[in-house]
Amino acid sequence: MKTAEQACCEVDNWIAEEELPVQTQLKVIRQNGPDYGLTEDELDERNEFIQWYLLQDFAPLLSVPRQAADTGLFIPEVDVTSPEYSAFSTHDFLDSLQPFNKYGYAMKKLMERIRDLAILHSCLSSPEGRLNTLHRYEAFLEAKFRTRLAYLIERCQSTDDPDRKLEMKQKIAELTRRIMEAKRIWERYAPWDS
C-alpha cells in the first residue's frame, strides 16, 4: 500500500501533458496546405472533380463497349490494405505467367536473321557481294531447315507406324511452311536479281 507521500512524489515525477512529444496520428495543419479550411464534403467534391477532369483524356476510350466482367483499362479503386493492391496484380506480371514459347521465339529470330541478310543483299552494289550474301542465305536455310527436312522425309518413308508417320508429316509440313516463309521474306526484302 502506498502512502500519501509516495503518491505525491509519484505525481510530481509525471511529465506534464504539454511536454509530451507529438502523437503519430496527429497531422500538421498548414495554412498554405491545399486541404486547409475545407470540410470533408468539400474535399470529396474536389477530389471527385479532379478525377473527372483527368478522365476526360480517356473519354473516347472509355466510350467503347466492353463485357460486363471486364474491369477495363483502370484498376478498381482499392486501398493499400486490400489484396488487389499489389505489384502481382498488374498486367505485366500476369502476362509473365503465360508459358514462354521457345520454339516461336527461335523461329522469330531466325526469320529476323533472314530479313537482315535480304536487306544486306539489297544494299550491296557489287555483284560478287550480292552473290556472297545469297550463298550465306542458302547456307543458312540448309543448316536450319533443309537438312532436318531431308532427315524427316527419309525417316517418314522408312517407318511403318502410322502414328509416328503422322507426327513426322506434321513436322515436315511445319518445316516446309518455314522454308516458304523464309523465301517470302527474301523476295520481299531482296528485290535485286540474284
Image (cartoon, grey):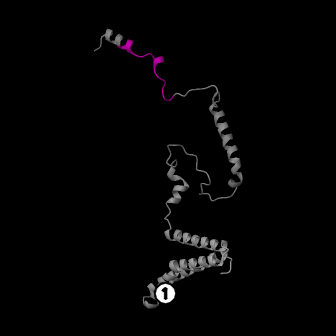
Residue closest to the eye, 12 or 107:
107
For this orientation, the residue located farthest to the left is 1
Residue 60 seen in the current view: yes
Picture quadrant where residue 34 is located: top right
Picture quadrant where residue 137 is located: bottom right
Q: Amino acid at mark 1?
A: Ile
Residue 181 seen in the current view: no
- Vertical side of 56 occupied by 128: above or below: below
Query: Is 48 inside the magenta-drawn segment?
Result: no
**Residue ID for mark 1:** 153
Residue 131: x %, y % from top left:
62, 79
Residue closest to the eye, 180 or 25:
180
Residue closest to the eye, 192 or 91:
192
- Residue drawn at (68%, 53%) of the image: 62
Query: Is 22 inside the magenta-drawn segment?
Result: yes
**Residue 91 vs residue 127: left or right?**
left
**What residue range appears in magenta?**
10-25
Q: Element under label 1?
A: helix
- Residue drawn at (44%, 91%) of the image: 158
Residue 86: x %, y % from top left:
51, 48
